[in-house]
Image: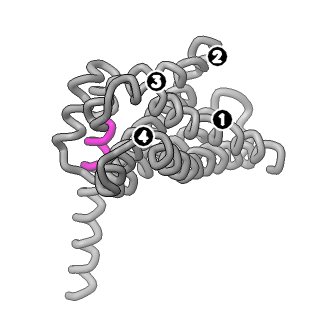
Amino acid sequence: MHHYMDVGNYFIEYISQMIHALTFLGYIFRLIIKPQSGWEDVGESGYTREQWLSSGLLPLLSVLAISCFIHAFYGEFVLNIALQDAITSFVSLFASIFVADEVISIYVKQKIATDSEEDSNIIIDKTKIMSIFNIGFFALIFTVRNIVPIENTLFNLLPFCTIFSLASAWEFIGIDKDKHVVLCIVSWLSAYIPAIAISEIFNLLL
């Protein structure tokens, strides 16, 4: 009986995680279509950075990894290449989360003046949430690229377009618009550059 209860609890937790993952995806689409109101919705959701990460971004990164196997069917399927792409895609974006977090913390503490350490920590936490969605944008774009056989240079430029959505997050972060411009760029670069660099390193090593 206890075993069945454990299975039931696990199943309920799994369904809850999937619902939250779909919620995260829904917020991403809102941020693409209406960035200003989308960030207001993110702020009103009450979700923490850890919740967005564990139940939103990580499942999306898993979907990205799986999509690498779908992409492999568009040419001659080679299992080890598909596996390599899946590992590289997941690890590169996963690692960029922590690089971005560290860069954001250092930048806010050194460059954005606040009245107290508590205010500084609030800005850091909200900027980290912004970064989570930024990386979520990347994961969604790369997943679509894997699922749909698109070979177009313009499609590869889409990650650069995410910065326009991030630029509307200044009220969500709680800082002046002029200060947010640089913070936005720092946040975007701190996620994108490590992801590309780590991906290239993995491609050389694997």
Characterize the local packing of mark 2: few (<14), some (14-19) or many (20 or more) Cα atoms within 10 angstroms: few
Three-letter residue code for mark 2: Glu
- The residue under label 2 is 151
Question: Which contiguous range is marked in magenta?
Answer: 19-25
Q: Name above or below for residue 134 compared with residue 3.
A: above
Q: Give residue 130's quadrant in the image.
A: top left
Residue 8 to residue 135: above or below: below
Label 4 – label 2 distance at C-alpha: 41 Å
Residue at image mark 1: 72
Q: Nearer the viewer, residue 16 or 148?
A: 16
| Tag in front: 2 or 3 | 3
Identified by mark 3, the residue type is Ile
CA separation in Å, label 3 and label 1: 30 Å
Across and down, in percent, residue 75 comes to 70, 28
**Element carrying mark 4:** loop
- Look at mark 4 in the image and give the residue it sits on: 112
In the rendered image, residue 24 lying in the magenta stretch gets the answer yes
Residue where numbered disc 3 is placed: 163
Q: Secondary structure at mark 1?
A: helix
Residue 72 location, quadrant:
top right
